Image (tube, grey):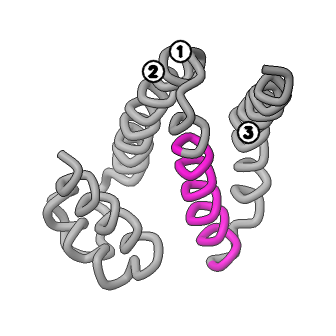
Amino acid sequence: MLLASALIAAYAASLVLAGTITGRLFDVLGFGIQSGAIPDGKPRSYVLFIYGVLGAVLTGWMVTVAGIAAGPLRSGERWACPVLAISLGTWFALDTGLSLAVGFWQHAVFNLFFLTCLGLPLAGWRSASKEAALHA
């Protein structure tokens, strides 16, 4: 499972970092279309399809985040906070960096909302756990 997740993460990151190259493979395998083509007469349904795929990935990620937050993070396991912070930071750097690089600053600003919603509670938990450790 670790190997599979590492390989999938590397491929997913390559879509962000070298999208025109690896995106061709994803166009064909993931969406069944030739690179750069939107199916004839279906631009709106194609966009909805892309949103659906993105929504499914985000839902899966948030289920994982919630599971770690409700279990290991809440029970004070030391690995949980850094794993969530690295996950959040990786997403933010890749998504926001790509958004800015290709000229979609509005999406980068939109990402700040999600970073705040997830990052502030995580930072608060980390600060509280450090304070508790000092008094223990």
Mark seen at residue 67: 2
- The quarter of the displayed image where residue 96 is located: bottom right
Rendered view: 13 above or below 110 = below
- Residue sitting nearer the eye, 38 or 76: 76
Q: Position of residue 18 (x, y in %)?
A: 40, 82
Going by the numbered disc 1, the residue's amino acid type is Ala
Give the extent of the magenta segment.
83-101
- Which quadrant would the C terminus be assigned to in this image? top right
Magenta highlight on residue 133: no
Whether residue 36 is visible to the viewer of this picture, yes or no, is yes
Rendered view: 111 above or below 63 = below
Going by the numbered disc 3, the residue's amino acid type is Gly
Q: Is 111 placed left or right of 5 in the picture? A: right
- The extreme front residue here reads 136
Determine the residue positioned at 85% across, 22% down.
135
Viewer-nearest of discs 3 and 1 = 1
Q: Which residue is mark 1?
A: 70
